[in-house]
Image (cartoon, rainbow, N blue to C red):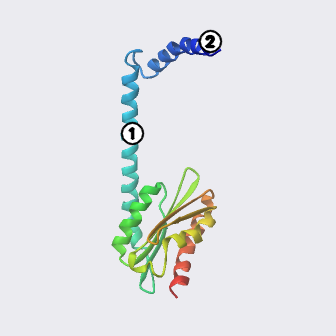
Amino acid sequence: MQVSATLKHARVSPQKCRLVADMVRGSREEAEDKVRHLLDRSRQLEKEVRQLKATLASGQGSDLAERATDVDGIKVLAARVDGADPKALREAVDRLKQRLGTAVVVLGSVEDDKARLVAGVTKDVTDRVKAGALVGEIAPLVGGRGGGRPDMAQAGGSDPGGLDAALERVRSYVTEQIR
């Protein structure tokens, strides 16, 4: 039985080889190199897309910093940055924390019908507001959960419709924690 399966596979392989070669516009002998080249190119393009998303998120960060409000000497910023993946959100949160000084920053995004949240708290505030607890509070509003360290945490959820409500909750949560 195993021999017949091996023979069947051997008969199909040349057909599949030709199909793959046709798809990469080459001969059967060139197919492996062409597929390898396409995979390398795909990885490079994915890297470039990640870098562009990070650049986009940080570019928006300059404008976002101006929207921060003050709560007892702590700059609080909660904003939506659509199109940013979690890595771009984390990088933007770090840049905003540096720019704002003493701050709590939460950025949210919708990607692939999922809500993403990243919270950052500067070290001088973590004794009063912890990023992990903050995302634990707001993540249920997007149908998810999250967690992390006192200075950086993230969450995801299946209800992107709740993202605005989650971001709106940030200021009142911070106010409750420090008063």
Residue for point 54% across, 68% down: 135
Query: Please, what is the three-letter code of the amino acid marked with disc 1?
Result: Arg
Q: Is residue 131 left or right of residue 166?
A: left
Quarter of the image where the N terminus is located: top right
Of the two numbered discs 2 and 1 in the rendering, the one whose residue sits closer to the viewer: 2
Residue for point 49% across, 71% down: 131
Please state the horizontal and vertical placement of residue 25, each as a whole percent of the image: 41, 20
Marks 2 and 1, how far apart at CA: 38 Å
Please state the horizontal and vertical placement of residue 162, each as a whole percent of the image: 62, 64
Residue for point 59% across, 72% down: 137
Q: In the image shown, does 109 or 27 lie closer to the viewer?
A: 27
Q: Residue furthest front?
A: 2
Question: Crowding near pointer 2: few (<14 within 10 Å), some, many (20+)?
Answer: few
Secondary structure type for disc 1: helix
Q: Is residue 62 visible?
A: no
Q: In the image shown, does 28 or 163 lie closer to the viewer?
A: 28
Query: Please, what is the three-letter code of the amino acid marked with disc 2?
Result: Ser
| Residue position marked by numbered label 2 in the rendering | 4
Residue 43, numbered circle: 1
Please state the horizontal and vertical placement of residue 154, each as a whole percent of the image: 50, 63
Q: Is residue 147 left or right of residue 41?
A: right
Query: Image quarter for residue 155?
Result: bottom right
Residue for point 38% across, 28% down: 36
Secondary structure type for disc 2: helix
Please state the horizontal and vertical placement of residue 19, each as a whole percent of the image: 50, 18
Q: Earlier in the sequence, mark 2 or mark 1?
A: 2
- Up the image or down, 25 lies above or below 107; here it is above
Question: Crowding near pointer 1: few (<14 within 10 Å), some, many (20+)?
Answer: few
Query: Image quarter for residue 146?
Result: bottom right
Query: Image quarter for residue 34?
Result: top left
